[in-house]
Amino acid sequence: MPNLRSVLLTLALAASAPLAMASPNLITNGDFETGDLTGWTKVGAIGEQYVSTDFYGSPLARSGYAYYDGTTVGLGTLSQTVATVAGAIYTLSFDLQRINSGGPNTLDNQVKVSFGGVTLMDESNASGDWATVSFSGLTASAASSVLQFSLHNYYDYTGIDNVTLVMTAVPEPTMAIMLAAGLILLVRRRDKRPPPF
């Protein structure tokens, strides 16, 4: 039977480890399969920001049937405020597509991504088919954080799909270790008491 010290040490190590089980996606409607922008807020050049399901009869989403289409002359912003835990670590992932049918001399686009006010990506005048973009080790600084995409594509469109944000580690794991170490010291001290007469 395990003694109290080994149980406490096991609990401390488990509490300090990253989350082993998959955390739920904190983003509402990250795949846009509702067919609209439920859960999202759009500002700026919003005239041509929409959920697209079809283009000349062919679905263009990375998966499913819908994706966010940011075809804007000016910079349009799509954002979502999510509940986070201050000090916790998160991973952001999304699929990105930048279409440019006019050739390399007509590139005029921009993609900016930020989380909690920190810019993660700011790229201009690039093109390419669907690719997954990920950022890990993102630390939340408050009880809520804003995920923001700012998109501009003058000649064609920029697509976003399958947005996920998951917690990958709990905050301050050293606190659990310190607590367990203190309890172990108390148990040791108790063990050293002389036996009663």
Image (spheres, rainbow, N blue to C red):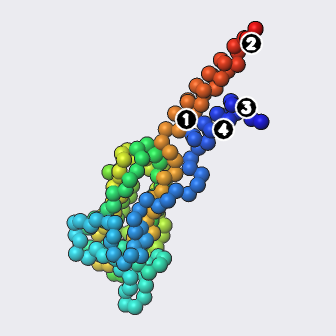
SS for callout 1:
helix
Query: In 3D space, how far apart are the residues under numbered discs 1 and 3 (Cα atoms)?
Result: 19 Å
Query: In 3D space, how far apart are the residues under numbered discs 3 and 2 (Cα atoms)?
Result: 19 Å
Marks 1/2 in contact by CB < 8 Å: the verdict is no
Number of other residues with Cα within 10 Å of mark 1, as a class: few under 14, some 14 to 19, many 20 or more: some
The answer to whether residue 153 is visible is no
Q: Nearer the viewer, mark 4 or mark 2?
A: 2
Number of other residues with Cα within 10 Å of mark 3, as a class: few under 14, some 14 to 19, many 20 or more: few
Number of other residues with Cα within 10 Å of mark 4, as a class: few under 14, some 14 to 19, many 20 or more: few
Residue marked by disc 1: 176
Circle 2: residue type: Pro
Tell me which residue sits at (26%, 76%) in the image. 48
> Residue 46 or 64: which is nearer the viewer?
64
Tell me which residue sits at (65%, 17%) in the image. 189
Circle 3: residue type: Asn
Residue marked by disc 3: 3
Query: In 3D space, how far apart are the residues under numbered discs 1 and 2 (Cα atoms)?
Result: 32 Å
Q: Nearer the viewer, mark 3 or mark 4?
A: 3
Number of other residues with Cα within 10 Å of mark 2, as a class: few under 14, some 14 to 19, many 20 or more: few
SS for callout 3:
loop
The quadrant the C terminus occupies is top right
Q: Nearer the viewer, mark 3 or mark 2?
A: 2
Marks 4/2 in contact by CB < 8 Å: the verdict is no
